[in-house]
Each structure stands twice: as C-alpha cells, then as structure tokens.
Image (spheres, rainbow, N blue to C red):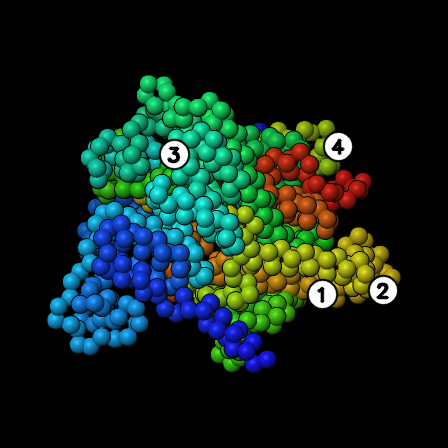
Amino acid sequence: MRVLPIALLLALALLVRPASALDTGAVQKLAFGDNDEQIAAVGALVAEGDEKAMALLQALADGELQVAGKRVLIVRGDAAVDALSGAKVEPLPEEHDDITVNNRLRRELGGALAALKLASPDHKVRLMAAKELAGGADDSMLPLVRKALPKETDPEIKSLLELIQATLELKSGDKELRLAAVRTLAQSNNPNTKTLLLPLLERDRDGRYAEPDEVVRAEAQKSLRAVEARLAWGERAAQGFTGLSLGSILLLAALGLAITYGLMGVINMAHGELIMIGAYATYVVQNLFRAHLPGLFDWYLACAVPVSFAAAGLVGIALERSVIRFLYGRPLETLLATWGISLFLIQAVRTIFGAQNVQVENPVWMSGGLEIASGVVLPYSRIVIIFFAACVVLLMWLMLTRTRLGLFVRAVTQNRPMANCVGVATPRVDMLAFGLGSGIAGLAGCALSQIGNVGPDLGQSYIVDSFMVVVLGGVGQLAGTVYAALGLGFANKLLEAWQGAVLAKIAVLVFIIVFIQKRPQGLFALKGRALES
Amino acid sequence: MDAPPASGAPRLPGLLGPSGWLALAAFAVVLFVVFPLCNLVAPPDSAFHISAYWVTLIGKIMCYAMVALAMDLIWGYTGILSLGHGLFFALGGYAFGMYLMRQIGADGQYRVNMPDFMVFLDWKEFPWHWWMSDQFWWCALLVVGVPGLLAFVFGYFAFRSRVKGVYFSIITQALTYAAMLLFFRNATGFGGNNGFTDFKRILGIPITTPEMRMALFAITGAALIGTLLLGRYIVTSKLGRVLTAIRDAESRVMFSGYNTLWYKQFIWTLSAVICGVAGALYVPQVGIINPSEMSPANSIEIAIWVAVGGRGTLIGAVLGAGLVNGAKSWFTVAFPEYWLFFLGLLFIAVTLFMPRGVVGTLQRLRSRRP
C-alpha cells in the first residue's frame, strides 16, 4: 500500500522535471552538433517550453553561450554559469569558445524565443511578446501565433494576437486565407484595424488595386464598414458620456441658482464665488485629513461634502442678512451689489490662499476609469459626479415638495403678502432659502474640485453658464433647470466634436440669446396672466 | 458757445442752464488751452508741466466718460441695464485698430507688409473682414457701423419680443462673453489673445510724438463735450421725455399709443455707436486692444461708474467715470491688493446707501436747504 504514494511522488517528480532541468542531450547537440542537429535541438527545447530553455536560447541569441571543453556555459562578462545545472563556474576556464550562430539558426532562434515567450505563464511576458510581434512580425511567426491563439485567455493579448495573425495572413498568397483574415479583422475592437484594411482598397499609380481579388476587396469593404461602425459607436458613447458629464456639472452649478434666482428672484452674481468657496472648503478639509488623519485620506470627501455645504451656506446667509435683503424687488441693484460681493470674495480668497490654483487630490477610488470599449474610458470621477448631481436634485426635490420649509419657500415665491398674512415668517424663509441655494453652490464647488482647477477665478467661469441654464429652463421651475442643463451639456459636446470647443460654446450662447427672444419665459414657464412680473 | 440754442418744445427745459454753460466753457478751456500749454510749452521741470502720463490717463478717462454717458442714456434714462457695452467699445476699438495695424506697414518684426500675428500664423493674404482696412475713411465708418449694426439687429429682436429687465441684462452679458471667446481665437483674425498693439502711426504721422498725443487728447475732449451736449439735447427733448416714461412705466406708454420699440431701438443703437467712437479714440491713446476688453467684468464696471456718479444725470456719468477710474489708477499703483476690495465695497455701498449717486445726493442736499 505504501507503493502508491511513492509512485505518485515519482510521477510528480517526472512531471516537474522538465521545469527544473534541461534535456542534456538537446543542450549538447545545440552546443556541439552541426547545423541540422542544432536546429533539431532548438525544436526540442521549444517543445519543453520552460523558462530555463528560454534563458538558454536567449543566451545563445545574444552570443553569451560558450563551450569550454565538454561543458556548456552562459558567460556574462567575467562570470559564468553552467547552462545545464545553473551552478556557478569559478574560475572561468582558460579556453572557451563561442558557439557559431549562422543566419539559419538565428532565424530559427528568433521564432523559438517568440514562441516560448508567447507560451510563458507570466502575463507580462506574453503581453510584451505580443506587442513586439505587433510591431513587426514576418511570415515565419504565423504558425506560432496560430498555436498560441487558442490557448490565450487574456482578452488584451488575444486581440493583439488575432490582429497579428490577420496582418500576416493578409499578405499571404492564398485567397481563402486573406478572406478569412479580412473577416477576422471585422470582429476586432482595435482602432488599428482600419489602417490595415484601408490599404487593401487603395489603387496604385496604374489604377490597379493593392488587393487583386474582387471578392476579398468586397469583403474588406464590408469589414471596414463594420469596424468603422463599431469605432463610431464607441466614439458616440464617449461623446454621450461627456455630454452627460458636462450636463451634470452645469446642473450642479445651476441648481443653487435655480433656488436663489429661479424661486426667490435674487440676481446673485456672487453665485460663482459661492461655488468657489465650496471648492476651497474641500481643499481645506483635504489638507486637514492629510495632516491629521492620513489613514482616512481616501474618505475625506465624506467630510468635505457637508463642510462645503455649510461653508457656502453660511456665507450665503451672511450675504442675505447684510446686503441682499435690503434690495428685494430691485433686481438691477441686486445685480450690481452682488457683483461687488463677488469681487470682494475673489480678492478675499486670493489674499488668504494666494492667487495660484491649489491642488485638490482625488481619492484613490475615484481615479482611473471604466473602459467600455478600446480607447473609450469613462473616468470614475465623472461617473461619481453624475450620481452626485442626481442625488442633489433628488434631495432638493424632496426638500421643496415634502418638507415644511419647502412648502413655505413655495408659498413665499407664489404670493409673498398672502404667505405673510397666514403667519409665515417670510424674512426667515428668505434667509433659509438663500442659505440652501448657496449651500448647493458649495456642493457644486466640492464636485468641481475633483475634476478641475481650484483657483480664485473658478466661479467666474461658471456664472454665465449657470445663468444661461436657469434662464433657459424657465424661472421658478426645477424640472426646467434639469432639462436645460442636460440639454446644454449634450448640445455643447455634440457641437464641440463638430466645430471645436470655442465655436461650440459661442454657438450655444448665441442659441440661448435667440431662444430667449423667442420665449422670454424659458422652456417651462409658469402660466400666469401678469403683464409684467 | 454762450447763447443757449432754442429748444424744441416751449415747456421743455433749455439745453443747459447759465452755470452749466459756464462750467462747460471752463472745462473746454482747461482741455484745449491749459493742457496743451502745460504739456507742450511748459518746460519739463517747471511746476506747471503736465507729463505725458497724465495726458494719456485723462484722455483714457475721457473715453470711459463717453462710454458712461452712453450707458447713462440707456440705463439711467431708459431703464435698460446693458451688461454688454464693453463689447461695443471693443468693437469700435478693433475697427480702428485694424487701420492702425495696417499703418504699421512693413515696420513690424517680420518686415512684411502685414500684421505680425498674421505672418506668425503663416497667412498669405488678409481675411475678408480686413477688406479696405488700410483706408482711414472705411475704418472710421466701421467704428460707427459695426457696433451700430450689431446693436440695431440685437436690439430689434430683443425689444420686439419685449425682453426686458434682468433678462435683457443677462443676454447682453452672454453676447459679450460669446464675442470675447470668439476674439480669443487666433482663427478669427484679430490677433487672438494679444489683440492689436505696437502701433506706429495714424494717417502717416507717428503716433508717439507729444503733438500727436495732444491732438488725440483734444479730439477725445471735443468728442466728450459733443456727446455730453448730444445727450443733453436728447434728454431735454420730447424724445427724452418718452424715454424716461418708458423707464418708469412702459406699459402705460404703450397704452398711450407710443410704439416703444423704436424709441428704445434708437437710444440703444445710439448708445452703442457712442461706445464704438469712444473705443476708437481709446485704442491709439492706450496703444493696445485685446479681447479682455470684452470680458463681462469690464461691462459691468461701466454700470458702476454711472451708479457712482448718479443715474439719470448726464454729468453724473462723467463724474462717476472720472472718480472710479481715478481711484483705480491710484489704487492699482498704491495698493494693488486692495483695489478689488475697494471696488467690491463700492458696488455694495453705492447700491445700498447712495442709490442716486454722488450728483443725485448733492442735488437732494441742495434742494433740502431752504
């Protein structure tokens, strides 16, 4: 009964053996045999397919394999190791000769090394080898690639290999093979396939096609279209995503304004600066975490979100109490006064934090991105912001429709004297509503700090945009703001792909200017009969 | 200059009162006699000498005062707050700047008969909008025509659909913002970021000589006085009365049978043209024009000049432009860090405590005295 374990052990040892030692005969033949024998030995070593064989062949290719008497050595500089046992050989034998590697052997070696690397269990080695082959492979590699393909599990390497195979087959004389290659290319996600297929359809100076066969050409045309369609799809998806992302950013920037301007009618030109305050609050929280709680640094945002809300909200309440409440009903004066406030805040931040942009770092879980197709990466930070914007909208909607404060805010908006008569403390509601709008601006700043520069001028770049969103969406309407922000985001990105960023922006502004002249009440106006509001 | 001309309707006030004419005459004497004498004739070390710095500074402020007058006509008298007047100012400046760029000739860095930025961009010929830009009269026409036309078209659509109040302010702001982005592009053909600078001569005369500087100064002064009189003429006429009525109760004016569109349209376009002329006078004196002149911040600053001086009083606009810009050039040298604090507080203080501005407050104090 004890025989079995021993037999198992033996079997295991046999199995393991090729990985730990080389076939002595093959090595001997490689070192001392004639050309044919050498090539046969290379084949045998490749069949073993382990790392030692790779090292040995690599050494041979590099001219490091030498013979001294009956021993085969790998010599690097003055140090030498025995090729078979791996033991150090000291001192270096007096007489040692290079093994001659003629062109035939060298070619064989190159293929063998590539094959070994492609079969390597190490993912990195395989990837390197595949990339090297993609850079320039000749026909001799084709069988190797074919052999490696079905075994490959990693999608990245596999697609690379498929590409290499198709590239090689495209050059073959066999029409069927070319046809198959063209079809394989149609399946590929790699943007490079286009450059492979295009030359097939080109004509040379005499008007002859590069590809002589009609059928293959037609197939290539079809594949090209398929590849282009797939690439275009990826591009469109990426565009849609950036549009959504820009829309959510605009939405965040404009939501606060939808309350202060849309509901309360206060033209707050300092809105952008409230966004900036939110961003700087995030910066401060980040620095505090880095200094005092480096272990929790990845979660500093959880603290920064409420802090930026509170900071901007408190500044907003202070503004409302000190300046804005004296100017209710005088929109143009409010505009000028709040512009003054914005200048003041910008200079204050510049004095405290300096005129340079400050660095706000993404937490680790927000860096990187999701790759949905080759070359189309959706950054996590943007995805998080889209969800964040959705949450803020939801919370705000709940706040306005489901809470007592929201009820009061709506009542004061619709009929201030009547609300006052039934006992709503309108000044208090004004203050809280303005604080809420400002706080949401702070949240926008917190989000913006994750994807853009944070500097004293941060708010200035958003003020025109956010007013456009609110005005376009229609004053007094939350839904209008959401639609307008997303619509503007998409429109901007679509035009951007077509005409460049600056012209797109200009086009959108001009569109809004024209639109307002057609519908001064915005997209979703509250119905009313007032001649003037 | 002494006798007030006959005004249109009998019950309307005269163009200026006796003291008004006297003040204007004194102002004209200072501009056209004292300044040239003290700048050109008085030796540099004498106590009466006025340096080139002051001539340029006052010349610049007079251009701003013209813009403030234009702003006062449209905001103070008609009640329409434009946040896009910087655009008209810059357009006038750019139109005249084109001429100045052509006058550089082959004296640019590349020694080619083309503005440096075009050589730099490797352009071989002038873009279409530079057509005839080497002709003085054509550019002078553009100075008036481009802001006027833009204002006319924009105003027509805005006023026809009765865009008013804050909406109008915001879309004018969007307009100047869009224009700024457009002019920042190199491909637009106006020198991108850097705009136009390094001017050499006007009508073949070198631009940097003291005589040229003085001439520009005097022309600006004359233009300012002309604008002031024109504005005064408008606000004291029946037209001015209608404009004020539009400001105070537009619906009632309409119900009384006036078509307010054309009144607003007229004053709006005129205001833009005045800005364009001011811009054209500003550029050769300051020596540079770039897209930042179109930034929304600049336009909104114009409103504060008028607010500080006093809305609805033309002299207040001139005074406000002088006070704020004088303070600015002093502050930005003495305490560059505190200028924005000061300006911000000025915005807040004026709207909260001095809604009638300096002139309005003075008038009120005087009328309170028995």
Q: N-terminal of the two: label 2 or label 1?
A: 2
The chain identifier of the residue carrying mark 3 reads: A
Circle nearer the viewer, 2 or 1: 1
Disc 4 to disc 1, how far (Cα)? 41 Å
Inspect the image, locate mark 4, and give the three-letter code of the amino acid beneath it.
Phe
Instruction: Judge by depth and name the residue closer to the eye, A263 or B153.
Output: A263
Q: Earlier in the sequence, mark 3 or mark 2?
A: 3
Q: Which image quadrant is residue A84 in?
A: bottom left
Mark 3 and mark 2 in contact? Answer it, CB < 8 Å.
Answer: no
What amino acid does circle 1 point to? Leu
Task: Say whether marks 4 and 1 touch (CB < 8 Å).
Answer: no
Q: Residue B102, located in which quarter of the rendered image?
A: top left
Give the Cα distance between marks 4 and 2: 38 Å
Disc assigned to residue A171: 3
* Residue A423: numbered disc: 2
Q: Position of residue B363 (x, y in %)?
A: 57, 53
